[in-house]
Amino acid sequence: MKNIFILLLVTKSLVAFAQIPANYYDDALGLTGFTLKSELHSIITNGHSDQGYAALYYGYESTDTDNYYENDGSVLDMYSENPSGTDPYYYTHGNNTCGNYNSENDCYNREHIVPQSVFGSASPMKNDIHFVVPSDGYVNGRRSNYAFGEVSNPSWTSLNGSKVGSNTYGSYTGTVFEPIDEFKGDIARMLFYFATRYETQVDSWSHDMFNGTEDVVFADWFLDMILEWHYADPVSQREDDRNHAAYEFQGNANPFISHPEWVSTIWDPTPDNEAPTAPTNLYVSNETSTSFELFWDASTDNVAVVGYDIYKNGVLAGSSNIEYFVLNGLNPVTSYNLYVVARDAASNESVNSETIIGTTLAIPFYLVNEDFNDCTTVATNFTPYNEASDKDWTCLDQYGYDDTGCYRMNGYQEDVLSKDWLITTNKIDFTTYSNMYLSFYLLYKYGNSPLELLYSTGYNGSGNPSSYTWQSVPNLTIDTPTGTTEGSQQITNIDISSIPQDAYLAFKYYSNGTPTRWTLDNFSISANNGIGVNDYSLEKMIKIFPNPTNNILNIATVPNLNIDSIAIYSTTGKLLKTYKYSEKSFNIDIKGFSKGIYYLHINLDKGNIVKKIILN
């Protein structure tokens, strides 16, 4: 243990390199073909300081830490990472290094993208962090010294989807190892690095991936495949960060991460002048007041489409390597002109797609927004009514969504049938507003007693609710519980606009059979007013100043327009504060709020508008 400690101290002192210098590749600029490859060989050989095999585990702390997927600081292993979900297992740096292994998740070790047997485990190849990466030991063993390839019928598949089996790409039919798509470009660029860094030795090494030359290096079938991998999986932020960290560790860089275009300049020199086809069938979905999602059909290209650029009102809004993009930070009730451009690895761009219009929604105006988080001390938007039995809806400070406050109906059936109501304290205004949407969260356990959500236009807010006519809330189905397993149901944006008049809403629980424990949380009703929150005639009749402001907002209207109330909402739609007024002008103090953007919902006698304000 003492010797290891000394080694790490010495290693740390050896790797105090700067980031890749801006002029690092200057001598290679303007060169092409294998002349470029040889110059890059000189650049990345000079300065390469072999840190030794044991030091790789130390180096992985900076080169291969998961700050990109789970973002949990674990070892980023290309053979176990699940980029679209939870990893099947993970390792922490310095723990569970191999060692013996019998299955996945036993330990991790060091995987040579070009197997050690190719170069006789000689240094510096054995210790080169640019192509020696952390890997689950068992998967590393299953990869063995096989070439990389593509597999249709695997004989073995790892927990993250890496495969072993007969190759189905090109003319080679031997056993190969196929990594998942997320890392195929990374591995291809590691191989191009290896072929360049060890250019003067590689022609003496034999492997099914190689052709015995020092210029091309790779067998025809293998070169075609890794070129495709390189084009289809462009350099990621993770890969770029790893390149800089590897430079700091051992003093040289992978040029094909810094300049991915050099891959085609060396190994695929025929110029690609063919642009991709334009993306088609753009459409907008899942609109909110500040965002929407944009979808389109994929473009095609003679080589490969590597990404898409998304334009908003003629300005680049962002890029994506899939046919999907989320536009955030938009203004409510605003229309945007949108088009998408496809590009390939040679930077050829398609013509613009068709231009479509995406329009954000109004910021939701919440008629009811109840999270029950302080209902043990503060009145809520609901009132319980006990029609029969001594079991009632009860406010609790836990057991709701994320174990927050909630209302719970215990639902015990003893000698008397439970008949319990939870009714909105006030009648809901269905006359003034339109586009009304209902959301809430339920937990249920035990029995099979149902829960109903009803509305009544005749109920007057007092007395036994069963004496009045109640109807089912439209478009809503609440789960029917069965057995003892706890279930949950998230009700989201149910359209209840068809309720014809102002009405009370009520949860009705009549135990009939085996009682059920129902838990209610996060109840809300959002709406727009009939005029719409962006009515331009009203916009001209009201003035807010100064904006941005440090603490005080002055608000004034024209003489024939009165302000009833003002509510301040966060950008996520959370109600923060309400001001009640019946004046034509006044000021409000908002110095207690944090710096940022807020929205004022201004309720006027002639309609409602929303104003964005900025607090410095």
Image (cartoon, rainbow, N blue to C red):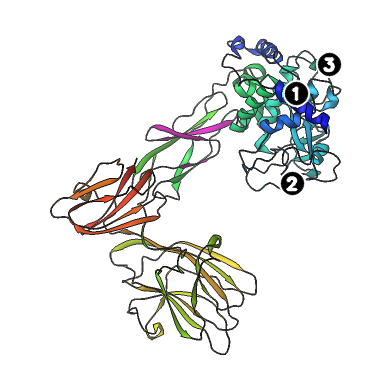
- On screen, residue 108 versus residue 500, left or right, reads right
Q: Label 3: which residue?
A: 204
Q: Nearer the viewer, mark 2 or mark 1?
A: 1
Disc 2 versus disc 3: distance between alpha carbons? 36 Å
Decide which of tag 3 and tag 1 comes sooner along the chain. 1
Label 2's element?
loop
Residue 118, compared with residue 558, is above or below; it is above
Foreground of the two, 187 or 148: 187
Disc 3 versus disc 1: distance between alpha carbons? 34 Å
Dot 3 amino acid type: Ser
Q: Label 1: which residue?
A: 10
Label 3's element?
helix
- On screen, residue 105 versus residue 524, left or right, reads right
Decide which of tag 2 and tag 3 comes sooner along the chain. 2
Dot 1 amino acid type: Val
Foreground of the two, 385 or 483: 385
What's the mark number on residue 159? 2
Residue 315, compared with residue 251, is above or below; it is below
Image quadrant in which you'd find residue 46: top right
Dot 2 amino acid type: Leu
| Residue drawn at point x = 57 percent, y = 21 percent | 272
Image quadrant in which you'd find residue 145: top right
Residue 611 position in % (x across, y down): 29, 48
Residue 245 position in % (x across, y down): 65, 27
Decide which of tag 2 and tag 1 comes sooner along the chain. 1
Which residue ends up furthest to the front in the rendered image? 2
Residue 518, compared with residue 150, is above or below; it is below
Residues in magenta? Answer: 303-328
Label 1's element?
helix
Foreground of the two, 5 or 471: 5
Residue 394, compared with residue 269, is above or below; it is below
Prevailing secondary structure class for the magenta stretch in the rendered image? strand
